[in-house]
Image (cartoon, coloured by chain):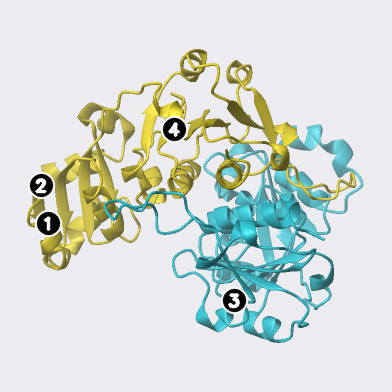
Chain colours: A cyan, B yellow
Amino acid sequence: MLSKNRIKQIQSLKLKKFRDAGQRFIAEGHKLVLDIFKSNLFIESIFATANWLYENQKTLHHLKVEMVEISEKELHAISSLTTPNQVLAVIKIPQRKFNNNIFKEDFVLMLDEIKDPGNMGTIIRTADWFGIKNIICSHNCVEVYNPKVVQATMGSIARVQIYYEDLTDVLSNLHPSINVFGTFLEGTPLKKICFEKNGVIIIGNESKGISSAIEKFIKEKIYINPFYCENGFSPGPESLNASIAAGIILFVAKNFCSK
Amino acid sequence: MLSKNRIKQIQSLKLKKFRDAGQRFIAEGHKLVLDIFKSNLFIESIFATANWLYENQKTLHHLKVEMVEISEKELHAISSLTTPNQVLAVIKIPQRKFNNNIFKEDFVLMLDEIKDPGNMGTIIRTADWFGIKNIICSHNCVEVYNPKVVQATMGSIARVQIYYEDLTDVLSNLHPSINVFGTFLEGTPLKKICFEKNGVIIIGNESKGISSAIEKFIKEKIYINPFYCENGFSPGPESLNASIAAGIILFVAKNFCSK
């Protein structure tokens, strides 16, 4: 049984200011919560139906986590989902210290003002699929602990390390041997780009693209060339969706031309 | 000035049953409405602010369309958007007759129970970017005239021909020379697939993938292989997002191995 105060406290984590103040976020649903169990994120409390607690007792019994049995009605009260799914966890926001070693091993994704929660979540999930372990977000990106982002990552929030940094600072201090790629509406067709085994891949804002402050650090401009027929009457779309562009570039970077 | 009845009538088009009954849908915002002007979709009415009508008078003056000047307050009342954008158009749902000739020239995308409006809109936009002119949806896909889908297409709804058909019927009647590809969580790695200049590419449902009734028609199973390290402890995500998979496959189909 949850007190009114407790319900309010959990509900407050839907808002950024309360996540910032409490340094906690929420994740919901069986798969997502189990993914977080297996990660190095720290779960503080679990609110779950009797059924879920019973079915997962083997996984849960050695965990030092507050576990609270709640009714379906209480789950609806605290959930951010239209169709809540058995379990909700309150998790500590990890304090990650960024350092330049992350650029040595693999590609690092850099997001310049990605605003849409769905895009952000999908980019994190896609990066995870292609084995990317680190994403650096500009401070004006959507916050990744927003419930919509957390759910759209489908569990990848538990595995990918996400940093919020001043991108110009990071890029200024990058070793000159690290290649920096960025998506543009002109540049070298992606098919002709030669990726090595590491580098920074920058994805720009959904409508404005990569900002001019960042553009000057880019060594190779990537263009995912369209195939529609430009007849001057009704040409194609102005651009690709940011998460689609990220997915295509990561596929190529990982599958072609790597040394 | 809009009557209460007119407002109700426009608002009703947010719901599928009224779109079905009236065979009309709504599209909003400057760019989307202009894209529809340039297409062969039939705009019935435009509701716009005085400013927008003034700024676009050159484009509008030869059009035989009902144009209604409305206030910002009225725009808010009829809009599906949180931040309405100057103009809303009511458009006739096109009556398209599907025929087998569409398979001759280029790739055709086939969607098997795509449910998420954001995914559907992004897939249509991405197909348009890669010059795909025809998409066949199963009857249990989300309806493409849903306002969320229309907005997510970013104008591509005006250019791509979308059909709702029984996919097994269409596939049964396909000429044997047409190749049929489908996305699976096993199969031939995408990098090794040889696409020709046409074929059917099937994208499956967000959680269930391609249904078994459809699977038997597939000649080549495509697998977008992950790059995460399977250490048995915390592996990667279960799958890629459906629109990301579609984007990657279309990029490869258009850029590699085409004859």
Numbered disc total:
4
Q: Residue at (92%, 47%) from the top-left corner? A: A62
Name the residue beneath numbered marker 4: B105
Dot 2 falls on a residue whose secondary structure is loop
Using the numbered discs, state the Cα–Cα distance from disc 1 to disc 3 in whole angstroms: 42 Å
Horizontal relation, residue A163 to residue A74: left or right: right
Q: Along the polypeptide, which appears first: circle 4 or circle 1?
A: 1
**SS at mark 4?**
helix
Kindly identify which residue carries mark 3: A139
Foreground mark, 4 or 1?
A: 4
| Same chain shared by disc 4 and disc 1 | yes
Residue B5 lies, in percent from the top left, at 12, 42
Q: CA distance from mark 3 to mark 2?
A: 45 Å
Q: Do discs 3 and 2 belong to a common subunit?
A: no
Using the rendered image of the protein, determine whether residue A8 is visible from the camera's viewpoint: no
Q: CA distance from mark 4 to mark 1?
A: 35 Å
Judge depth for marks 3 and 2 and give the one in front: 2
Q: Nearer the viewer, mark 4 or mark 3?
A: 4
Q: Residues within 10 Å of mark 3 (few under 14, many from 20)?
A: some
- Please give the name of the residue rendered at 58% of the width and 19% of the height, measured from the top-left corner: B214
How many C-alpha atoms fall within 10 Å of the one at disc 4: few (<14), some, or many (≥20)? Answer: few
Q: Which residue is mark 2?
A: B65
Determine the CA span between mark 4 and mark 2. Answer: 34 Å
- The reply to whether the C-beta atoms of the residues labelled 2 and 1 are less than 8 Å apart is yes
Q: Which mark is residue B131?
A: none
Quarter of the image that includes the N terminus of chain B: bottom left
Question: Which residue is located at x 73 percent, y 59 percent?
Answer: A91
| Chain letter of the residue carrying label 1 | B
Q: Which residue is mark 1?
A: B60
Q: Quadrant of residue A92?
A: bottom right
